[in-house]
Amino acid sequence: QVQLVESGGGLVQPGGSLRLSCAASGRFFSIRAMRWYRQAPGKERELVAAITSGGIANYADSVKGRFTISRDNAKNTVYLQMNLLKPEDTAVYCCNVYATLTGFSRDFWGQGTQVTVSS
């Protein structure tokens, strides 16, 4: 299986920055897509950003130009640099990876980390 450990959430003022990290460990052969989702209270889960194994990134329109997703394949870690944060970015952020294990591939999810943007 794959274990995902997220870190970097917290409380930040509007206009501030945070960097989230998600490290994958376990018995897998490879990790393909790595993604960050978020879910705010009373709202549906939203895909924030995704990055392929080759480094191609995609973003939700709401975060384009403010957030940057990156990955370190040697460390099996994905990052989300969040700048110019807004109160509407407040949510629980979860990482998701699509990993290949022995005989199958599937999605794995982290526990989530709270990001609160407030003055």
Image (cartoon, grey):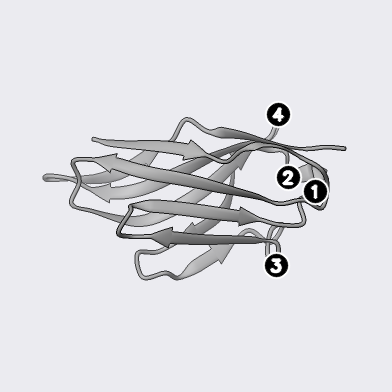
Mark with earlier residue (2, 3)? 3
Residue plotted at (42% across, 36% down):
5
Q: Is residue 114 above or below residue 12?
A: above
Earlier residue among tags 3 and 4 = 4
- Circle 4 is placed at which residue position? 41
Q: Which of the two marks, 1 or 4, is nearer to us in this view?
A: 1
Q: Which mark is residue 89?
A: 2
Mark 2 in CB contact with mark 1 (< 8 angstroms): yes
Q: CA distance from mark 2 to mark 3?
A: 14 Å
Mark 1 and mark 3: span between their CA atoms?
13 Å
Mark 2 residue type: Asp
SS at mark 2 in the image: helix
Return the disc, 2 or 4, that comes first in the chain's sequence.
4
Label 2 to label 4, Cα distance in Å?
11 Å
Question: Considering only vertical position in the picture, is 73 above or below 7?
Answer: below
Q: Which residue is mark 3?
A: 65
Relative side of 71 to 46, left or right? left
Residue 20 place in picture, x, y as percent: 56, 46
Q: Residues within 10 Å of mark 3 (few under 14, many from 20)?
A: few
Task: Count the marks.
Answer: 4
Q: Residue at x 53, y 60 (%)?
A: 69
The numbered dot on residue 86 is 1
Spatial CA span between label 1 and label 4: 16 Å
Q: Amino acid at mark 1?
A: Lys
- Quadrant placement of the C terminus: top right
- Counting residues from the start of the chain, the first of labels 1 and 3 encountered is 3
Give, as a three-letter code, the residue at label 4.
Pro
